[in-house]
Image (tube, rainbow, N blue to C red):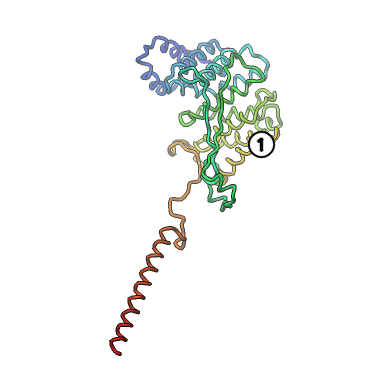
């Protein structure tokens, strides 16, 4: 690590300790102007034996514990790199070098699973219906949905899936590691629109490395890091795919495409249906779509199919309004016809 980068990190470590509470918000807003700070912190995280790793992890946890949204997002941007550091060290069976990273990740996890009053959170998610548009489908492309008795009975009903309450964790074990890491990725994905391009690149690299290490594709990707296979879960891959989807639509086309292919490759080997379903759905939705090669081309977004604003109702369609109009026209016709017949009758009666 260069002396200049070390000086930048040491200055950052010292200035926050002397900061009064009233100046935290101003300080948080000023962090984005420190262009050399973020790359220097990345270098510290990548050097497992750096003397600055422990104080950096401690300060990142203090940022997250402060409750200031900008400071929390500053910490979250390093999450993919922290996850890779933890997983690579665990795969190398050298856990003593990742103690401070484990403490940081467990600290963030334990803060996120409870609310402000210390009560366990229960998160809810609404499952989209095929009859309503979502990120992954458009009803118009599916065709007409059969109006069966079951479909009519479920019309307008929404399915809600709950996550939690989650247990407090004091240490990582083989049983809870991916439960914690999946939840952390879920928190990261909730703040994707605030993540930097460097963070999205790190996420794509994490996805590829986790999925190909120890498999033949590692040689094809020419990755010369560790060659030990890493255990993954379907939920963990789904969270990776969610972040990759956002990266694909916001400038990281090459890295994102490789990462998505690598995750699907691993999901096929492991026969993980959830990851295959979500990954193939995203791949199909992006097929033939021109993605932005640079995030500066416009605002951040996710590529979706939007229902046209023009009316899809045919001019000859029967609606309640047309029925009422038809009824009035028929009434007017009958009235005019009756009037003509009465006049004709009166005329004939006069002539006779």
Q: Read off the residue under disc 1.
A: 273
Q: Judge whether 10 appears above or below 235 on screen.
A: above
Figure quadrant of residue 269: top right
Figure quadrant of residue 204: top right
Residue at image location 59% in from the left, 12% down from the top: 99
* 271 vs 6, nearest the viewer: 271
Circle 1: is it few (<14), some (14-19), or many (20+) Cα within 10 Å? few
Task: Estimate the x, y position of residue 123 in percent, counting from the top left.
Answer: 52, 28
Task: Estimate the x, y position of residue 295 in percent, counting from the top left.
Answer: 46, 36
* 83 vs 105, nearest the viewer: 105
Q: Judge whether 283 appears above or below 108 on screen.
A: below
Task: Estimate the x, y position of residue 14 in percent, counting from the top left.
Answer: 43, 10
Q: How many marks?
A: 1
Q: Quadrant of the C terminus?
A: bottom left
Let me know if residue 252 appears in the view: no
Q: Residue furthest left?
A: 350
Let me know if residue 209 appears in the view: yes
Task: Estimate the x, y position of residue 338 in percent, counting from the top left.
Answer: 35, 75
Q: Label 1's element?
A: helix
Q: Residue furthest bottom?
A: 352
* 223 vs 333, nearest the viewer: 333
Instruction: Using residue 74 as the reference point, say whether residue 184 is left or right of it.
Output: right
Figure quadrant of residue 25: top left
* 35 vs 86, nearest the viewer: 86
Instruction: Using residue 104 as the reference point, say whether residue 194 is left or right of it.
Output: left
Residue at image location 70% in from the left, 23% down from the top: 228
């Amino acid at each position: 690590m260069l002396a200049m980068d070390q000086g930048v990190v040491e200055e950052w470590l010292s200035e926050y300790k002397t900061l009064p509470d009233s100046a935290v918000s101003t300080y948080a807003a000023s962090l984005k102007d420190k262009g050399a700070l973020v790359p220097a912190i990345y270098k510290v995280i990548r050097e497992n034996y750096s003397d600055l790793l422990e104080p950096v992890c401690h300060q990142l946890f203090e940022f997250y514990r402060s409750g200031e949204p900008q400071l929390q997002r500053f910490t979250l941007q390093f999450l993919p790199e922290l996850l890779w550091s933890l997983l690579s060290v665990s795969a190398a069976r050298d856990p003593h070098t990742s103690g401070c990273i484990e403490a940081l990740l467990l600290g963030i996890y334990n803060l996120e699973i409870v609310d402000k009053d210390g009560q366990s959170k229960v998160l809810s998610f609404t499952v989209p219906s095929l009859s309503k548009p979502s990120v992954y489908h458009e009803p118009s492309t599916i065709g007409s949905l059969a109006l069966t008795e079951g479909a009519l009975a479920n019309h307008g009903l929404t399915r809600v899936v709950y996550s939690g309450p989650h247990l407090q964790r004091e240490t990582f074990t083989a049983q809870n590691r991916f439960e914690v890491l999946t939840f952390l990725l879920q928190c990261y994905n909730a703040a994707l629109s605030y993540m930097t391009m460097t963070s999205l690149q790190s996420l794509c690299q994490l996805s590829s490395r986790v999925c190909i290490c120890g498999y033949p594709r590692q040689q094809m990707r020419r990755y010369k890091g560790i060659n030990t296979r890493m255990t993954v879960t379907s939920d963990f891959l789904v969270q990776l795919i969610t972040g990759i989807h956002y990266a694909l639509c916001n400038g990281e086309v090459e890295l994102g495409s490789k990462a998505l292919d690598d995750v699907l490759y691993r999901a096929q080997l492991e026969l993980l249906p959830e990851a295959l379903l979500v990954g193939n759905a995203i791949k199909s939705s992006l097929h033939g779509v021109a993605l932005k090669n640079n995030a500066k081309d416009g605002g951040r977004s996710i590529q979706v199919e939007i229902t046209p604003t023009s009316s899809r109702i045919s001019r000859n369609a029967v609606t309640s309004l047309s029925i009422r109009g038809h009824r009035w026209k028929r009434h007017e016709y009958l009235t005019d016809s009756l009037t003509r017949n009465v006049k004709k009758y009166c005329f004939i009666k006069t002539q006779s």
